[in-house]
Amino acid sequence: MCSFKIISIFLLVLLLFPSFQPKCGASASVEEAAALLKWKASFQNQNNSNLTSWNLQSVNAKNSSILPCTWAGISCTDGSIIGSIPKQIGNLSKLNYLNFYANELSGCAIPKSLGNLTNLIELYLYENQLSGPIFKEVGDLKFLTDMELGENQLNGSIPASIGNLSNLEVLSLQNNQFSGSIPVTFGNLNKLVNLSLYQNHLSSPIPPMIGKLSSLQFLYLLYQNHLSGPIPPVIGNLTSLQFLNLGQNTLSSTIPKYLGDLTNLIRLDLSDNQLSGSIPVSIGNLSNLQYLLFRNQFSGPLPELLCQSGILQNISVAENMLTGPIPKSLQSCSSLVRAHFNGNRFQGSLSEINWGKCKILKTLVVAKNNITGGIPPEIGNLTQLHTLNLSSNYLSGEIPREVGKLASMLKLDLHDNQLTGGIPQDLGVLME
């Protein structure tokens, strides 16, 4: 039997779930009232006096725009839920779905009584102001498939008991203040598809158990943490992976060649670490890659076949120590939108690549390299180009008049080269 004590505590929360997004107007109020009436119909005690006002003909609710705010046990606000999560929520033992996201819930911690909700399938508490640690009893929620606690102020270590959630598919703990290491028990989460732990204070190396997560497609594990050590070769086992973001840590050593086995990868971000050595040729096997971000301490040449499928959109290998020519195969990237090669030791001529084939290119930055030869006239065919930075190289000859055709140009930087001749009159059109 459902007691009215529980109703009076929790109907305010249910009424203001973001899934009921607070809406304006009579139709929204009637919709919310109808949802509550549907719940009321499941109660065994229909004669409870506190429920008599729960009807669409209530004297106090003739104005449908204020339904159901006048009903007994119901309070309405024009915004978010404010306050802490009451420990009595643990009494709702049959609850399957709990959604409190995007409110102003706060308090010292998520109540341990949530561990009593053993039938819970989905738990959404993200975008609040919750603090304190995650209760270890969370490991008792064996049916949980989706747990999203990101965008809060939670702290402490991530409980190892999360590894007991064998049905978990989505785990989002990003943008909190968690510290310590990633629990090795995460290796038990073989149904996990999305793991987001970025923007915390996690440290220590990446645990090898990560290679056991064979269902993983989205790994935002390391972005903006303090993880160190090498990228474990077992990451190559995650063949379903589509997004791999390891940026802004202190990872070191070289890129394991097994990353080239992740042929479903769409985005690969290793930027702002301390990785070094050469970029393995196997990266050219990533035929679905659209975003490649590699700012580190890499040396040697770029792999020639970086754009075999012609779908690469964004390549940034800036601020490394890369040498050799920029790969000619990039001219086959008809999908290329942004290309950053600046701050390296690239050599050769820009004319070796027919940039005119990259017709939707918007940004081309090759500054601070050892590029020689002239500026290729084909650049004038890049009608969507708004940033062209070829500064601090060894470019010679005259500025081709075709550059003046770039009507979308916002930034043109050619300083610190060996260019000669006059400034083409067509460039004046770009200033008008």
Image: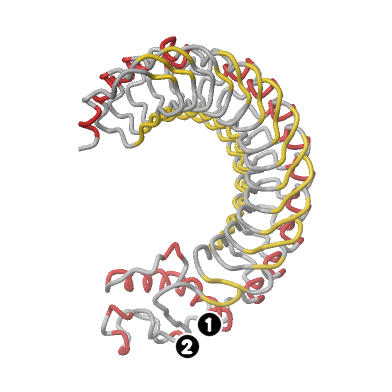
Element at label 1: helix
Observer-nearest of 381 and 102: 381
Compared with 418, 146 (above or below) is below
Name the residue at 54% across, 76% down.
10
Amino acid identity at mark 1: Ser
Distance (Cα) linking label 1 and label 2: 10 Å
Residue 389 percent location from the top left of the image: 42, 29
Compared with 258, 114 (above or below) is below
Residue carrying label 1: 8
What mark, if any, has residue 87 been given in the picture? none
Residue 232 percent location from the top left of the image: 75, 31
Name the residue at 60% across, 75% down.
84
CB under 8 Å between discs 1 and 2: yes
Residue carrying label 2: 50
Instruction: Please indicate whether residue 60 sits to the left or right of residue 431 in the image.
Output: right
Name the residue at 38% across, 69% down.
22
Amino acid identity at mark 2: Asn
- Residue 108 lies in quadrant: bottom right
Instruction: Please indicate whether residue 227 sits to the left or right of residue 197 in the image.
Output: right
Observer-nearest of 226 and 7: 226
Q: Is residue 207 visible?
A: yes
Compared with 35, 307 (above or below) is above
Residue 204 percent location from the top left of the image: 79, 44
Q: Going by the picture, which residue comes out furthest to the top? A: 352
